[in-house]
Image (spheres, rainbow, N blue to C red):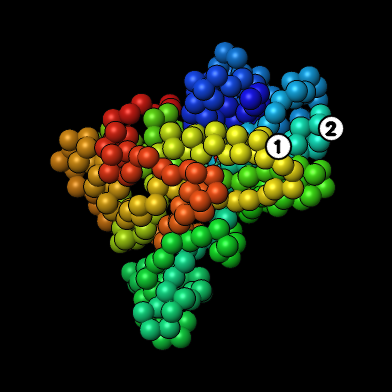
Amino acid sequence: MKVLLTGSAGFIGAAIAGQLEAAGDEVVRVDLMLEKAHGVSTAPEGTHQLDVRDAAQWGPLIDGVDAVCHQAALVGAGVAVGDLPEYAAHNDLGTAALLAAMHDAGVARLVLASSMVVYGEGRYACPTHGAQTPPARTVAALDSGDFDNHCPVCAQPLGWELVDERARLDPRSTYAASKLAQEHYTSAWVRQADASAVALRYHNVYGPGMPRDTPYSGVAAMFRSSLERGEAPQVFEDGGQMRDFVHVADVARANVVALRAVTEGGSGRYDAYNVCSGEPVSILDVARALAAATGSDLEPVVTGDFRTGDVRHVVASPQRAGADLGFTARIGPEEGLAEFATAPLRA
Ligand SMILES: NC(=O)c1ccc[n+]([C@@H]2O[C@H](COP(=O)([O-])OP(=O)(O)OC[C@H]3O[C@@H](n4cnc5c(N)ncnc54)[C@H](O)[C@@H]3O)[C@@H](O)[C@H]2O)c1
C-alpha cells in the first residue's frame, strides 16, 4: 500500500510511519513543522515540508497513492479565544483542501485522526433514574469543590459509563469544534466523491515521543515533566476524573488496520470508531502511577483547581473497533504508564 501521511513528524504520525514502513508499505511524509508543535526546527529527512491548506498545489506527490492518513492538525485545548481562526485554518480548511485535492487526483480512501473531544462530556447514569444528560457544571459548584455531574431529576451525583460511537456529539472547545468539523467534511466528501473513510476517535494518547510540557500537551506529559523538575504533579479537581489512556503504538496500529480496511473495501463507507484501551483510569491514579514508576517519593498534590472547559468523565467503549476493524489495544495503562514514566519525550 502507498500511503500519504499528513502530520508525519508529529507524535502520532511518526509512530504510524514507523509501523507502515516496518510492514513494507510506502509512506509519503508531509508535515508543515508547525512552530507551535515543534518550535523552530527543520523537517526530518524524507519529509515534504508542506501545508495541507495548499494541498491543491502538491501535484505529483498525491498521484498514485492508495490512501491518505490525515493526522495533521493544530492540537490542544484551544487555549485562547484568539486561537479560533488558527484552529479553523489548520483543521477545518486544511481538511477541506486535502479532500478536494484527493478528489482531483482520483484518491478516494482516507483515514482521519479524530478525537474523543467530539463527545464533550461522557455518558452518565443516575442510580435511580438511569441514563441522564447532565447540564454543564456551574462555576459556583466547581468553586465549592462539587466536581460531579448531578442527576437533573433528583440531584444525586451521576456515575460514569462507557461512551459508544452513537453518543451525542457536543464539542466544548475550539479544538473540539474543529475536530468534529473534520469528521463532517469527511462524511460529506464520502458521499460527494463516492469515496470511503474511517474516522478514529483517539482517547488520551501517551507514549514515547510525546510533546513535553506545553499548553498543548497532554496531562500525562505534564505530570511527567513536573516529576523531572523534582516537583509534585498538580492534579486538578479531586483527581477522580476518569479517562482512557491509550498507548501511541496501539493508536498507530489502529491506523494501519483502518488503512487496510478502507483500501481493501468498496466505496460509500463512512464509520467512526473509538480508539481506546478499554481500561478507564482516574487522573489521580495516572499521577500516582507515573510518580511510582519514576521512583520518586513525590506524592501528587490534589489542588481542587479546575478549568471551566474540562469535562468530568469521558471513557469509551472499544467494542465497535474490535467488532468491525478487529482492533483491540494491547498495552494497558498499568504497563504503558510504567514505561512512559522514563521514555524519551519530544523537546
Ligand atoms: N495526542 C492525543 O492525545 C490526541 C488525541 C486525540 C486526537 N489526536 C489527533 O491526532 C492527530 C495527531 O496529533 P499529535 O498528538 O501527533 O500532535 P502533533 O502536534 O505532535 O502532530 C501534529 C502534526 O501536524 C502538523 N501540522 C499542523 N498543521 C499542519 C498543516 N497545516 N499542514 C501540515 N502539517 C501540519 C504539525 O507540524 C505536527 O507535526 C491530530 O489530528 C490530533 O487532533 C491526538
- Name the residue nearer the viewer: 168 or 286: 168
> Does residue 326 lie above or below 314 as drawn?
above
Pointers 1 and 2 in contact (CB under 8 A)?
A: no
Number of the label disc, if any, that sits on residue 34: none
> Is residue 329 shown left or right of residue 92?
left
Labels 1 and 2: the sequence-earlier one: 2
* Residue that appears at 51% across and 74% down: 133
Q: Which residue is mark 2?
A: 104
Q: Residue furthest left?
A: 297
Quadrant (top left, top right, bottom left, bottom right) of the N terminus: top right
* Image location of residue 267, percent across then percent down: 74, 43
* Residue that appears at 44% across and 48% down: 276
Mark 1 sits near ligand 1, with its Cβ under 8 Å away? no
* Image location of residue 347, percent across then percent down: 43, 26
Q: Which residue is mark 1?
A: 109
- Say which element carries label 1: strand
Q: For ligand 1, give the image quadrant.
A: top right
* Residue that appears at 37% across and 58% down: 242
Question: Which of label 1 and label 2 is nearer to you?
Answer: 1
> Is residue 241 shown left or right of residue 334?
right
Quadrant in the picture for residue 306:
bottom left
